[in-house]
Image (cartoon, rainbow, N blue to C red):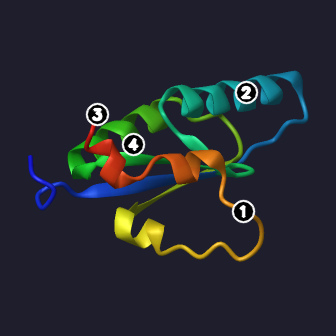
Amino acid sequence: MSNETRRFMRMLVFFDLPTITKADKRAYTLFRRFLIQDGYDMIQWSVYGRIVNGHDDMVTHLKRLNATLPPAGSVRCLMISEKQFTAMKLLVGTRKKQETAVNAEQMLLF
């Protein structure tokens, strides 16, 4: 597949989960571990993102995400193009190591 036919996208997952009871804390931990093991990087507290290669890959990861949702709380997923993601402005703070280390062009090497 050439660079022109690839359509890299970003999946952003936002979540707000309760951590009052032991069961809540366990659900939070399992969900967060799933995100990390499935290739998501933490962008901010309770905001994780990952690169996907096109719509079919996005659907696959969305199904995996739906299969591991915690029983309570709020979880949202936003799909944006890589171009939109790279146009995001950082207003305060610095980029994390994961954000500067990997971009869509580098993904072509894998």
Is the residue under label 3 in contact with that under label 1 (CB below 8 Å)? no
Judge left or right: residue 24 versus residue 32. right
Q: In 3D space, how far apart are the residues under numbered discs 4 and 2 (Cα atoms)?
A: 19 Å
First in sequence: mark 4 or mark 2?
Answer: 2
Q: Residue 22, percent across and down?
A: 87, 22
Q: Circle 3 sits in a helix, a strand or a loop, which is it?
A: loop
Describe residue 7's horizontal placement relative to residue 79 as left or right: left
Element type at mark 4 = helix
- Whole-number angstrom distance, CA of label 2 to CA of label 3: 29 Å
The quadrant the C terminus occupies is top left
- Contact between labelled residues 3 and 2, with CB atoms less than 8 Å apart: no
Of the numbered discs 2 and 3, the one sitting upstream in the chain is: 2
Mark 4 crowd level (few <14, some 14–19, many ≥20, 10 Å Cα): some
| Label of residue 110 in the image | 3
**Residue labelled with disc 4:** 62
CA distance for labels 1 and 3: 27 Å
Using a 10 Å C-alpha cutoff, classify the residue at mark 2 as few (fewer than 14 neighbours), some (14 to 19) or many (20 or more). some
Q: Nearer the viewer, mark 2 or mark 1?
A: 1
- Residue at 36% across / 70% down in the picture? 83
Judging by the rendered image, the residue that carries numbered circle 1 is 94
Judge by depth and name the residue closer to the eye, 60 or 4: 4
Question: Please, is residue 17 above or below residue 110 in the view?
Answer: below
Q: Which residue is mark 2?
A: 29
Q: How far is disc 4 from disc 3 in space, using C-alphas?
A: 22 Å
